[in-house]
Amino acid sequence: MSLGGALNIGRSALNASQLAIQVTGNNVANASTAGYSRQVVGLNPTGDGRFGNAFIGRGVDVSGIRRQADSALQQRLWSSLSQEGRANSDLNLLSNVETALDPLGNNNLAARLGSFFNSWSNLADQPGTAGNRSLVVQSGRQLASYVRDLRANLVSQRDQVDTNLQVTTVRANDLLDQVASLNTQIVLAEGGQGESGALRDQRDALVTELSKLVDVTPLPQQNGTLDLLVGSTPVVLAGRSRGVELKTTTVNGATQIAVVTKDNKETLPIAQGELGSLLNQRTELVNDAIVKLDEIATNLIARVNRLHSVGTSSTPLRSATGTLSFGTSDQPLAFNDPANQTISALPPALRPESGSFTVTVTNTATGAQQSRTIQIDLDGIDNTFAPGFTDDTSLDDLRLAFNGISNLSASVTADGKLKIDAATGYEITLSDDTSGVLAALGINTYFKGKDAQDIMVRDELSADPNLINAGQVVKGSPSANGTAMAIAGLRTERIKNLGNVTLTDRWDQTVQNIAVRTSAAKTNAGATRVVRENLDAQRSSLSGVSLDEEAINLLSYQRAYQASARFISTVDELTQSLLSIIR
């Protein structure tokens, strides 16, 4: 081996040790850097050289600097982050809704319904007591106010979900843009040789944050880029991001939201991550709770109003004005005509049906009575037995029918409400309504409104509780407490529209369903956290920096550097000795 060859060996050792010390120092500097992957220097012996009949080494080569990262483990960690993000968001949303419903409180909806029916039961026991009538009005107002406030709370939570969807989607779009930009930087920096650890760590950190928001599938490419897919839909291809945004549509009056790509509006099948939770829970949790609350409020309004509209009070009924306003174009249209927008806007439980009701006009001086049964035809068949609405009952038909009764007149007010008036010295009794048309129009009703958004006790009752109908007339037979007993009986009545259960049971089912889902969400959140922590620990053991290990490496490389320097010094002395002999 020549002295020049020896110097080359020493130089390669110095360079390798120096580089290894630099890499070790970089590891130590980033020991606390989140997402940093430990780097190691690859050292290989330089190819042997022939020396006579023997081969002798020619030093050390640096084969490269490698990130200690397992792509398969990293992908599993990203997947677990998406699942944990979904689980935590689910738990947060479910807990908020459960808190709003107050299932264990003393003033929740079930308790309010109980107080409402109790007030009617008390009125049935003592129908002539003014205090009981006031209690009926007060309990109804408290129930209606609670229902409106609860719905407003749920709508507010849905609006917050929509806001979070917008913010989260914007952040996801920004992360996708940054990943695409880093893909370009990595290709340019590496040029097909080696790995840029810092750039790849930055990209992994971005994908880690993105995975918490949406379930992405990474596809590493040979040139160093990382393509990203949601389901089977690509969102990042090399240095190009397709971008994501929210798309809002209205279907049957309901707002629907989806996350789509910016370039061609392709809907992304997001199932996990915070976005997956928000998209799912907006529909399945918040909207469902609002729908259930509206459903209960609508059926409460419908059932109570049907009974109250044909009830009697201590104050004779001489005039009544409906609460439902008809547009001018709807007044001549049959109630069941789809073109009648006023009735079509009502929930099915509030719409009238074929049947009849009885109107009795009483002369208050003589007690003489005149009764007339008004038929409501809503079968959708005309007088030729063909499908059609021309012979079905409209608001104008109903007005004319009332006007056909002696000492009774009917009109439509300027704001489209039906108004009936008895002549001076006469009073009106309404009874035996099998069509529900009086309740639908708001004639002599208890509630006004159509669902949880606008349910209220009728203004006239709030002003004068004596107008509360406690009694009723059934087939000509009066009862002093018939209406009060019937409304109190709604507590245990099974309603077909609600799945053949009571109002309270229907709400209890809703609350219990959310409670069960919340409990399951807690379990799921805990399970996904354990999985993520386990995978994170595995990644840390492979890619994390151990200061103890780096300290040992630093000492080892330092000694190697010192030995290499000593080796070169020795070779230099030999060279000087040789030169002195030659001289």
Image (cartoon, helix red, strand yellow):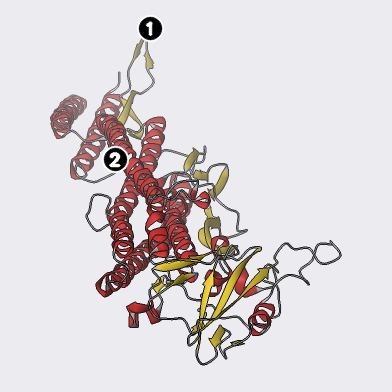
Amino acid type at circle 1 is Asn
Q: Nearer the viewer, residue 424 or 31?
A: 424
| Percent coordinates x, y for residue 287 in the rendering | 45, 57
Which circle's residue, 1 or 2, is located before the other in the chain?
A: 1
475 is higher (above) or lower (below) than 417: above
Q: Residue at x 26, y 37 (%)?
A: 19
Q: Can the viewer see residue 304?
A: yes
Instruction: Tell me the element at label 2.
Output: helix
In percent of width and height, residue 303 lies at 47, 61
Given the image, on which type of amino acid does mark 2 rest?
A: Lys
Determine the image quadrant of residue 354: bottom right
In front of the other: 390 or 27:
390
Question: Which residue is at 30% across, 40% downward?
Answer: 519
Q: Residue at x 51, y 92 (%)?
A: 424
Quadrant in the picture for the C terminus: top left
- Separation of marks 1 and 2 at Cα, in angstroms: 74 Å
Per the rendering, the mark at residue 265 is: none
- Disc 1 + disc 2, Cβ < 8 Å: no
Residue 344, image quadrant:
bottom right
Q: Could you tell me residue 247's position as x and y percent?
A: 54, 62
- Rendered position, 92 above or below 394: above
Residue extending farthest front: 366
Residue linked to disc 1 = 53
Is 209 in front, or is 195?
209
- Is residue 196 visible in the rendered image? The answer is no
- The front one of 170 and 320 is 320
Residue sitting at x 39%, y 42% = 82
Dot 1 surroundings within 10 Å: few (below 14), some, or many (20 or more)? few
Secondary structure type for disc 1: loop
- Identify the residue position indicated by label 2 in the image: 522
